[in-house]
Image (spheres, grey):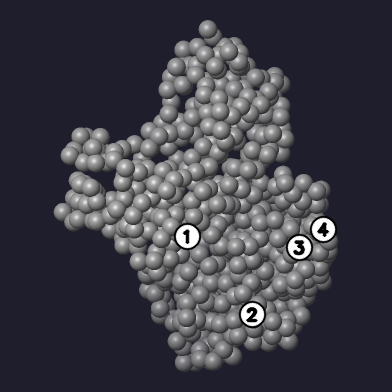
Amino acid sequence: MSLKRVFEPIEIGGITIPNRIARAGHGTHLGRGTYNEDIVAYHLARAKGGCGLSVVDSASVHPSSKITLANQDDAIIPGFQTLMRAVRPHGMRVFHQLYHGGHITPGEDGAPGWSASAIPSPVTGAPALAMSTGQIGEVVNAFADAAARCREGMLDGVEVHAAHGYLLHQFLSPLTNHRTDLYGGPIENRMRFLREVLVAIRAKVSRDIAVGVRVSASAAPGGVTEADLNFVLHQLQRENLIDYVSASYGDYSDIGATVGAMDRPVGYQLPSVSQTLADLTIPRMITGRYRTLEDAEQALREGAGDLVSMVRAHIADPDIVRKSKAGHSDRVRPCIGCNQGCIGGLIRDARIGCLVNPTAGHERTQSEDDFPSPVHKRRVVIVGGGPAGMEAARRCAVAGHHVILMEAAPQLGGMAAIARRASGFHAIGDILDWLEREMYRLGVDVRLSTYADADTVRNEAPDVVVIATGATALEPLWVSNGTQATQAMRHSPVMSSIDAIMSPQGTKGRTALVYDDVGHFEAVAVTETLLERGIAVTFATPFSSPFPYVQTTSRAHGILRKWALRNVELVENTTIHTMDDDTFVTDSGREIQADMAVFVTQKSANDDLYQNLSQSIVDLHLIGDAHTAGDIQTAIRAGAEIARKISSSKPISMIG
């Protein structure tokens, strides 16, 4: 597909954007209070990669709302200037997102969050303070002062965050605005706060920089509607208060609608924002899991928007624009929409990251541009073709080593190759396919259906050996301890997650018990697959809530809502004590009837080969699940780290 529309410039408020690819505002948690080298390096990587417009780093404009970055005094200006000096030579335009979280985030002193009305936070349940008119005026001035700092910091524009359930959205939505004064009631009143903010910003910065707004209709019934927002935007456009709009969807009532995961199609938000954007003449930025420039081109050709935001695609591969423009779209590392490293990293209050790109958030020290080039090219043998082994092989090949990868199965991917077969998880295959293509392109000697023992490895006369042989699911403790259920556990109605996903003919009957001892996506994948086959599921777990490690990815709400519609029964805080044919008895004595059961259990490392080679190979490494059980993100990171270590170290002669 020709990318003609993608690479057309566009003007926003007198600022020329070199292409139509943007990054909507998003937090990174890389800074604490102000800009630092980590934030600059993160954005610089995307500037070098060809992104046209970046709306950078939501920053709180007022002490009554605390997040990791603050635009509340002039201390932020030098950081802005450092950022702009770094990115300006690469052509990327930079706007800054101005934010107040309202009742979503408490004040810096721990005081209750401010909001339109005294309605508790949907995130924490903490009480909120209904703002006085004096406090509204205080925040209006804070937004304007923050915009002025952006101008002093040499930024190209600002974006006022009025979406996703934050303060200005709380005033727009009848669900959170129960006021009876001039700021409540009809939409003309509910938009008053937002309009006052924009009037104050224009008074401060005039037309020296671009000014935009981000909006989203409520996901919950009774909230701010598309029709409301269309009215608001036309009014703001008519008064020349905004130069562009960034349209999104949803709020904290369904965060999965805002940051759609792999089960959402490309452009999934378009049906929800079309009325919001109807008949506007200012530039319109759209979002919604656009993963390739071809996706963006199609949306632009159809007139869905004027710019396309691709935040997660840029997290996965900062060079997506540059590679695609050069005709190398197949080399773009794909975002798979898992939300584990990006959204998950932020929710865990760590830092932004990425399942497929282990350098995301670490660009200052670990970007692929500065991957060490070894003085000595080495012969590297890698055993295991899962994500850890493939990433290690790919990066070693990039560095110029001679790489041999041995995989016992007839295909690559390890356990991830099974996960990609599960209902709703097919996008996992995108990163596996990319790793495989890259290995072959870089000349890795891939040997499938090759069971490697110690002699097989030694016969290759390797300089370095990496063992990435994965892990095997353990039997539940009560089975291995020899309870009366041991034999029953091993008969046909009870199966592993691998069998449940890979063998449709083996999932017999109409009812199933899924017992989750891990709390991650594995049991979710099994359950989704069984439901797709028409099997009724009871989901049991020893945790106090289902799949606790999925909660940080924004996907849990949507999964549970879907399961409720499919009548999945959830049984928490329980273990299976005994079983007899189709009856499973919990530790509390409850009996669960099921035609079959799938047990998702902890893993045991497959490290026998490593142990067998430990006396004969000096430069020997154990990575991935073979070292410590984890997920695809930890596996890919382990592969990248070992490749960096191999390329940074001096050769060691083999012993034996």
In the displayed structure, 463 sits above or below 477; it is: above
Q: Secondary structure at mark 1?
A: loop
Q: Which residue is tagged 3?
A: 297
Q: Secondary structure at mark 4?
A: loop
**Residue type beneath disc 1:** Arg
Tag 1 and tag 4, C-beta contact below 8 Å: no
Q: Which mark is residue 2?
A: 4
Q: Nearer the viewer, residue 36 or 543?
A: 543
- Identify the mark nearer the N-term, 3 or 2: 2
Label 1 packing within 10 angstroms: few (<14), some (14-19), many (20+): many
Label 2 packing within 10 angstroms: few (<14), some (14-19), many (20+): many
Cα separation between marks 4 and 2:
29 Å
- Identify the mark nearer the N-term, 2 or 1: 2
Would you say residue 186 is visible in this rendering? yes
Where residue 208 appears, as percent x and y from the top left, is: 78, 72
**Residue type beneath disc 2:** Thr
Q: Which residue is tagged 1?
A: 555
Cα separation between marks 3 and 2:
21 Å
Label 3 packing within 10 angstroms: few (<14), some (14-19), many (20+): many
Viewer-nearest of discs 1 and 4: 4
Q: Which residue is tagged 2?
A: 276
Residue at x 44%, y 62% (from the top left corner): 559
